[in-house]
Image (cartoon, grey):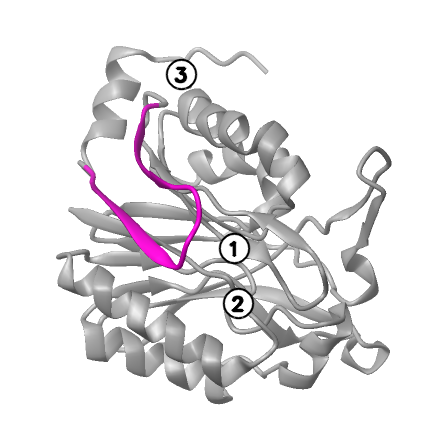
Amino acid sequence: MRVAAIQMNSGAGVEENLQRADALLADAADDDCVLALLPENFALMGKRGRDKVGIAEEPGEGPVQAFLSAASKRHGLWIIAGSMPLVSPQITAGRVYGACPVYDPAGDRQALYRKIHLFDVDLVDEQESYRESRSMFPGDDVVTVDTPCGRVGLTICYDLRFPELYRQLVDDGATLFTVPAAFTAATGEAHWHTLLRARAIENLAYVIAAGQYGEHADGRATFGHSLIVDPWGRILAEAAEGDCHVAADIDAALPAKLRREFPALANRRL
């Protein structure tokens, strides 16, 4: 089955971002993909972190989710919708969930994951500082969803640095991980490929990673390099930059085959 990672340079205009996302989803559908992953913050990369509050939606309500439902039906795709702002218990304090809804080709939502790990770091050498917790509220639930491509373990960006999450997803039956991201240019250059391939290799699972790229309204530069990795750690498709989709054919039965032949997961002792 053919899957796609959508790469974007989202800006501060929601309508423009949705129009661009729709065109890229159409390209993926024309490429015979059955599943497409949008990047983190596909609907808005604002001038300030708290701009997300202004477009935060209740689950199942609002224009961004209506767009996603309609797009999945229009294009006949499973859409794993990167991340978008949803209302959190601390919305009045300016904090939202970064949430990843999943839609089937009938336009029905099949899963909803809220980003667990928030990017609170100081990149001293790059003179950059990030505090996602000022405008975001963390989720708690580990989420998988069954698709024609296998059981998908849902993660978002900074989650990639926490391998214990991926082991729990594997224990819940995941054979494919999705990683929508807006990785910084500095951390992407240093760690993006290594971490994605490691998550694939150590769990004998496919990884689809969809990134933001280029400069954004807040002055942040993101790394791009959207890619698809097979369970043996081989990169099947990649795009360094540009609005585009990257696609690859995957074998939904391959992870189980490799896990039988190379039983590293079964050999765990801790």
- Secondary element at image label 2: loop
Q: Is residue 19 visible?
A: yes
Q: Give coordinates of residue 22: x percent, y percent.
A: 33, 74
* Amino acid type shown at disc 3: Ala
Marks 3 and 1, the one that precedes in the sequence: 1
Give the residue number, with chain letter if any, for mark 2.
10
- Viewport quadrant of the C terminus: top right
| CA distance separating discs 2 and 1 | 7 Å
Q: Is residue 218 left or right of residue 249?
A: right
Q: Which mark's residue is nearer the viewer, 3 or 1?
A: 1
Q: Give coordinates of residue 34: x percent, y percent.
A: 19, 57
- Secondary element at image label 3: loop
* Amino acid type shown at disc 2: Ser
Give the residue number, with chain letter if any, for mark 1.
212
The magenta span reads: 234-250
Contact, CB < 8 Å: mark 3 with mark 1? Answer: no
Contact, CB < 8 Å: mark 2 with mark 1? Answer: yes
Marks 3 and 2, the one that precedes in the sequence: 2
Q: Give coordinates of residue 90: x percent, y percent.
A: 79, 74
Q: Is residue 193 left or right of residue 96?
A: left
